[in-house]
Image (cartoon, rainbow, N blue to C red):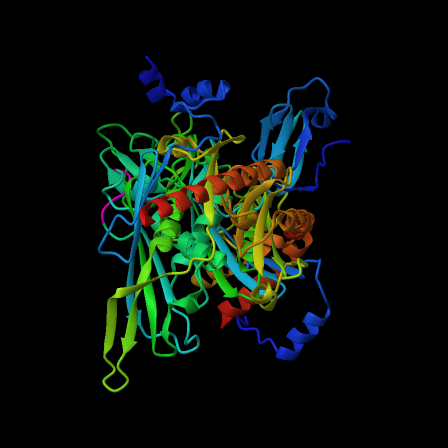
């Protein structure tokens, strides 16, 4: 019997290594979130849908609201506190992440970045370990910002489930594309379920936020249909 | 949402006439019934209903911090009045039970708190609370080693067993036993009893409850499948 | 060297002993610590007992008061057990309001009295609807070295068996209450529930009558209360999962312990009567 890929698994389920190996005999197996190796068995820790990707990656796709940091994730956070050379940033995890003032593009000891308490930052996780405080940076390994940094000039921040955030970032999702065809707006989506949007006016912002939240359980066709309706409604309201 | 259920005396009498009951009452769940929490569920077993919510892994108070695992907290709120010592005992039973199920070592220095609000107690309340807590943990996708299912058995004076008793069954029974099983080997995690009983009655109750627990696990799986496949 | 090993790796240290089926205090796995029972040691109380289980010491005093009964149960008296784990008995308790453990223990005692029905509440009636006895059963832990549950149960039952209440007369006209301390009558205690506690070490080894050190290492606990051959309660609040057979072993041991304990109570009571 092969592992139940694409099916619902719940904690306590387990399958042997042999069951997992079927797709690619020789390759190493990589276990993603929600799976644990115990003796010769693979145990499921979280309820979700078992997924597989070549060449041997298995993980459980589950519905989350609480963010647990993992390395390399792009997140949207709120600067909460300034402690010495560090900023404490709330990224929705169990502990606040630290952000050094040097990890911004062009920042030096002399030339400090302009970051204040209450600012929103778009950053990447550099350290994410269950035993350590998470650390985020706003530069890539070449020292360039590559889109990260403090998010300025107003806009609106709202929370979604982690699944929705991942769905928005999925290249196959048409939501942002079809919204972009109809409105002009800026958006930053963090995989921690925080989304910042800025549109031309308040009506558009509210419409965008509601569209994003409503798209959680819709497929691409439904999303396209919804976007069409929303843009009509918004243009009507703007005329009034 | 209607939070009160009116139970007519005729209905209770009609139910009594059905004789000894060896099946669980109907279970319904509403996963994600509240929006602000990480996991929430409203579970009803027959007419007994409770709401459970989960926060976590979240920030932990410094004096409760454990460096090698998550702190599990359980708060039980009765329907009427403030929590009393018997509720503290219930909280402790539930906390110890859930601690065994949660893979707490994966989230050190954080807290996983479960809040259970009793909304209607018409028998087998402890079972309903434990089951709702487990479903809420599943809804929040907290890492768990296994799931837990609780079943209550009432023993009548003539040694008849009633599975998942109503309030009336409980008051008429000579003893009420609540069992909790794990979902892997169906071993005993928790036993709580009230009233005297013999060893053979305990054995019989245990077998009965274990069979019933399997159907509770099936119910968990169905509930989770329904929720997870919704977005597919 | 042993001391350092114990400090650094208490669990491994313990396992070394268990490999030889013995515990660090030279007991077998199913062996209780020596139990010392002293009944009637507090002369100012209506009934009292002092229990020592190894180092664990619990003192129990029963104080009687008169009160009005509840309107719906005009003949029933009241039993109010209270367990106190003060800062005196162990450094792990802080002064102040009772902690969770003390509250749960008090509740366990109340449940035990209720389910075992060892005292018929109607025996506490003086004048139906007007006057009943309230027995305040105070259990104070003096030295906390594990297994307070068993010590408390033993102290509670012994103290109740030792309790004698004075005759009360009520003056019909004035409503004055008079007690006659010379004519004491013993409180009838119909049965003798005995509790036996176990801890689960390393998910599968059962140890009876744990010390404080053992309780800290435990991955679970079971308490079985028996009365003769009948079970009064099985209390296993979570922790490691056990098989049916392991539970059966616990019950077997509890029945055996109940025999020993009842004998001890009987003998002690007999010796003070003489």
Q: What range is drawn magenta here?
A: C91-95
Residue A89 in view of the camera: yes
Please identify the residue farthest to the top as the structure is shown: C1
Please identify the residue farthest to the front as the structure is shown: C274
The overriding secondary structure of the stretch rendered in magenta is loop
Identify the image quadrant of residue B175: bottom right
Identify the image quadrant of residue A123: top left
Residue at x 64%, y 38% (from the top left corner): B184
Residue A170 in view of the camera: no
Q: Return the residue nearer the eye: C195 or A69.
A: C195
Please identify the residue farthest to the bottom as the structure is shown: C173
Q: Return the residue nearer the eye: A101 or C270.
A: C270
Q: Is residue C235 left or right of residue A229?
A: left
Q: Return the residue nearer the eye: B112 or A98.
A: B112
Residue at x 52%, y 31% (from the top left corner): C203
Establish if C272 lies above or below B81.
above
Establish if B207 lies above or below A147.
below
Q: Give the image location of residue C92, x and y in percent.
A: 28, 39
Q: Give the image location of residue C232, x and y in percent.
A: 52, 51
Q: Give the image location of residue C154, x and y in percent.
A: 39, 46
Q: Is residue C129 left or right of residue A28?
A: left
Number of numbered discs visible in the structure rendering: 0
């Amino acid at each position: 019997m092969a592992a139940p890929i694409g099916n619902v698994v719940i904690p306590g389920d387990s399958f042997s290594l042999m069951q997992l190996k079927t797709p690619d005999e020789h390759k190493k197996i990589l276990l993603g979130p929600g799976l644990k190796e115990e003796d010769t068995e693979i145990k499921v820790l979280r309820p979700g849908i078992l997924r597989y990707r070549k060449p041997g990656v298995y993980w459980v796709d589950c519905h989350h609201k609480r963010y647990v940091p993992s390395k390399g994730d792009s997140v949207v956070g709120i600067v909460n506190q300034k402690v010495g050379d560090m900023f404490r940033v709330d990224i929705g995890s169990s502990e606040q992440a630290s952000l050094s003032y040097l990890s911004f593009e062009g920042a030096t000891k002399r030339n400090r970045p302009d970051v204040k308490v209450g600012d929103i930052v778009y950053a990447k996780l550099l350290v994410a370990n269950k035993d350590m405080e998470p650390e985020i940076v706003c530069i890539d390994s070449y020292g360039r910002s590559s889109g990260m940094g403090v998010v300025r000039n107003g806009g609106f921040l709202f929370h979604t489930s982690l699944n929705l955030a991942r769905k928005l970032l999925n290249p196959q999702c048409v939501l942002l594309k079809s919204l972009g065809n109809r409105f002009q707006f800026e958006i930053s989506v963090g995989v921690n379920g925080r989304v910042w949007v800025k549109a031309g006016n308040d009506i558009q912002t509210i419409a965008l936020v509601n569209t994003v939240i409503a798209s959680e359980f819709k497929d691409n066709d439904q999303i396209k249909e919804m976007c069409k309706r929303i843009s009509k409604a918004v243009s009507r309201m703007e005329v009034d | 949402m209607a939070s009160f259920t009116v139970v007519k005396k005729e209905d209770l009498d009609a139910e009594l006439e059905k004789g000894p009951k060896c099946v669980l009452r109907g279970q319904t769940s509403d996963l994600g019934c509240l929006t602000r929490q990480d996991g929430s569920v409203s579970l009803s077993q027959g007419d007994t209903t409770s709401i459970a919510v989960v926060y976590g892994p979240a920030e932990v108070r410094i004096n409760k911090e454990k460096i090698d695992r998550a702190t599990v907290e359980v708060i039980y709120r009765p329907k009427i009045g403030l929590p009393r010592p018997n509720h503290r005992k219930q909280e402790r039973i539930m906390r110890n039970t859930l601690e065994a199920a949660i893979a707490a070592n994966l989230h050190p220095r954080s807290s996983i708190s479960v809040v259970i609000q009793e909304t209607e107690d018409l028998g087998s309340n402890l079972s309903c609370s434990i089951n709702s807590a487990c479903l809420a943990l599943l809804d929040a996708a907290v890492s768990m080693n296994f799931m837990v299912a609780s079943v209550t058995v009432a023993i009548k004076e003539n040694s008849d067993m009633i599975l998942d008793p109503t309030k009336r069954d409980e008051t008429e029974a000579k003893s009420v036993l609540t069992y909790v099983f794990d979902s892997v080997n169906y071993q005993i995690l928790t036993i709580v009893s009230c009233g005297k009983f013999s060893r053979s009655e305990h054995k019989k109750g245990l077998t009965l409850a274990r069979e019933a627990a399997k159907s509770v696990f099936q119910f968990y799986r169905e509930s989770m499948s329904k929720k997870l496949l919704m977005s597919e | 060297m042993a001391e350092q090993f114990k400090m650094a790796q208490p669990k491994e240290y313990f396992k070394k002993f268990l490999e030889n089926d013995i515990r660090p205090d030279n007991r077998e796995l199913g062996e209780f610590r020596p139990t010392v029972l002293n009944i009637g040691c507090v002369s100012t109380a209506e009934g009292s007992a002092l229990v020592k289980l190894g180092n664990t010491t619990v003192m129990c005093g029963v104080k009687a008061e008169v009160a009005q009964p509840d309107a719906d149960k005009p003949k029933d008296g009241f039993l109010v057990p209270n367990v106190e784990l003060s800062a005196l008995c162990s450094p792990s308790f802080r002064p102040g309001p009772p902690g969770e453990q003390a509250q749960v223990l008090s509740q366990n005692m109340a449940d035990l009295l209720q389910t075992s029905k060892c005292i018929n509440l109607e025996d506490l009636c003086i004048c139906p609807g007007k006057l009943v006895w309230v027995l305040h059963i105070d259990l104070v832990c003096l030295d906390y070295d594990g297994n307070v549950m068993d010590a408390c149960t033993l102290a509670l039952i012994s103290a109740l068996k030792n309790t004698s209440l004075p005759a009360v007369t009520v003056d019909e006209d004035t409503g004055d209450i008079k007690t006659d301390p010379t004519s004491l009558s013993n409180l009838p205690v119909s049965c003798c529930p005995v509790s036996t506690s176990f801890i689960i070490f390393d998910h599968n080894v059962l140890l009876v009558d744990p010390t404080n050190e053992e309780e800290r290492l435990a991955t679970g606990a079971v308490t079985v209360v028996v009365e003769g051959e009948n079970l009064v309660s099985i209390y296993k609040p979570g922790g490691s999962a056990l098989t049916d057979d392991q539970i059966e072993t616990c019950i077997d041991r509890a029945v055996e312990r109940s025999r020993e304990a009842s004998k001890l109570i009987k003998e002690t009571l007999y010796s003070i009567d003489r």
